Image (cartoon, grey):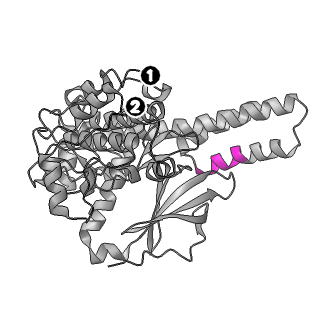
């Protein structure tokens, strides 16, 4: 059944002017938008709030997606900048990847050449490693959920199916797309979400290099498709380099306990045959639950609002109780991660302001203070003042003082 996702007549969302529709899903649509003053392009995911009353589980799912995205800050993962709402809609302001889905790029190219496929795969693994080190399982990795920005870099998107991986706990919900689902998922068995994600990466790699999926069924017979996934090994064309063929075989292993880990993927000869892109070189640290020991007695209400949808505990009172004890806790670690991520977003805004100010100073030295570009840059600084945090505003005031 098709759902009317609405939002056709909307022209503005906060300070953003809505442009064309980028995509439509079951719960809403994503529109391109640009900021009314600085022209910055973003994606706006528009979700009808009345759907939450029809399907309460959808509200939980959407708010969990927001919370998961708020936990992450990585060059190959789509960023969420803000969440706005009115009486009718919920608006997610997200990073815009202008070159669209990797799926469409593959369709256009038919298959991706070895060197470019390797670069894409390295970036996907880098983003996924970050997710897993922060105990986040994507659970719906596929070509359609991987985007390309204006420099042809990967952006992992759509965390609507994402889940936190709790130590010593298996997941049970069947989710994701059938062609990318792992054998344990299609067998309806409890599964490790991280190992299932790695299987999906193997499917993506195979598709990039061959232009087709490793497991497919012409008549869309799901039972036959699932049997292929559960019991068969894909036929790997001779055109695929031997070291890459070995990697695909290591990933698409039916037994999840024998499947390649990210560490094993990273030492594969094909994976190492080209230097890692600059964005993939920063080491990613595991979350150390024991390292965050100081109790939190006065938690920030905004951060609490993002922790609640993760459903780690039954209510807010339990959440407050765990935060205020000295006992090692994943909840306290996630609280600090959200706190750190907010600081990084503030820093990102500061970097934009620094860049605009440096360019304006250069224009002034060149005697171009009054030209159009100079005015536009100064308006950009003014605009950033309008929507950064109070903490950032203090720093902006200092910058402007030294300019005058």
Q: Which residue is mark 2?
A: 122
Residues shaded magenta:
380-387
**Magenta: predominant secondary structure element?**
helix
Q: Residue at x 22, y 47 (%)?
A: 320
Q: Kindly tell me whether residue 182 is visible in this rendering.
A: yes
Residue 272 falls left or right of residue 39: left
Disc 1 marks which residue? 274
Residue 216 part of the magenta segment: no
Mark yes or no: residue 331 visible.
no
Residue reaching furthest to the right = 367
Instruction: Estimate the x, y position of residue 336 in percent, counting from the top left.
Output: 32, 36
Mark 2–mark 1 Cα distance, whole angstroms, equals 10 Å
Percent x, y for residue 240? Answer: 36, 33
Location of residue 303 in the rendering, given as x and y in whole percent from the top left corner:
35, 48
Quarter holding residue 37 = bottom right
Q: Is residue 54 above or below residue 242?
A: below
């Amino acid at each position: 059944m098709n759902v009317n996702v609405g939002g056709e007549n909307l022209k503005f969302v906060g300070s953003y002017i809505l442009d064309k529709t980028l995509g439509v899903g079951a719960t809403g649509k994503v529109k391109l938008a640009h900021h009314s003053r600085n022209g910055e392009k973003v994606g706006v995911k528009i979700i009808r709030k009345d759907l939450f009353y029809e399907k309460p589980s959808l509200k939980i799912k959407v708010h969990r997606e927001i919370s998961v995205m708020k936990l992450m800050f990585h060059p190959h993962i789509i960023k969420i900048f803000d969440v706005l709402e009115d009486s009718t809609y919920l608006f997610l302001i997200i990073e815009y990847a202008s070159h669209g889905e990797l799926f469409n790029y593959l369709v256009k190219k038919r298959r991706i050449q070895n060197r470019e496929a390797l670069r894409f795969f390295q970036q996907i693994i880098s983003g996924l490693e970050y997710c897993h080190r922060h105990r986040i399982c994507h659970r719906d990795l596929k070509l359609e959920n991987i985007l390309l920005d204006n420099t042809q870099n990967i952006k992992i998107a759509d965390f609507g199916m994402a889940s936190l991986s709790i130590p010593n706990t298996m997941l049970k919900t069947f989710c994701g797309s059938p062609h990318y689902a792992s054998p344990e998922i299609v067998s309806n068995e409890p599964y490790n979400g991280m190992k299932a994600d790695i299987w999906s990466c193997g499917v993506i790699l195979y598709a990039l290099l061959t232009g087709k999926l490793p497991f497919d069924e012409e008549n869309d017979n799901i039972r036959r498709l699932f049997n292929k996934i559960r019991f068969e090994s894909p036929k790997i064309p001779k055109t695929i380099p031997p070291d890459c063929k070995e990697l695909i075989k290591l990933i698409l292993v039916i037994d999840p306990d024998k499947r390649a880990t990210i560490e094993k993927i990273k030492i594969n000869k094909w994976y190492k045959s080209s230097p890692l892109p600059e964005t993939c070189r920063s080491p990613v640290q595991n979350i150390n639950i024991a390292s965050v020991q100081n109790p939190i007695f006065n938690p920030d209400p905004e951060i609490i609002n993002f922790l609640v949808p993760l459903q780690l505990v039954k209510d807010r009172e339990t959440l407050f109780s765990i935060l205020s004890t000295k006992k090692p806790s994943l909840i306290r670690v996630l609280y600090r991660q959200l706190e750190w991520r907010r600081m990084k977003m503030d820093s990102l805004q500061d970097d934009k302001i620094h860049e605009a100010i440096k360019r304006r100073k250069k224009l002034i030295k060149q005697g171009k203070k009054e030209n159009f570009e100079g005015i536009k840059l100064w308006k950009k600084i003014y605009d950033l003042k309008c929507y950064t945090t109070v903490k950032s505003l203090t720093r902006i005031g200092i910058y402007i003082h030294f300019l005058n």
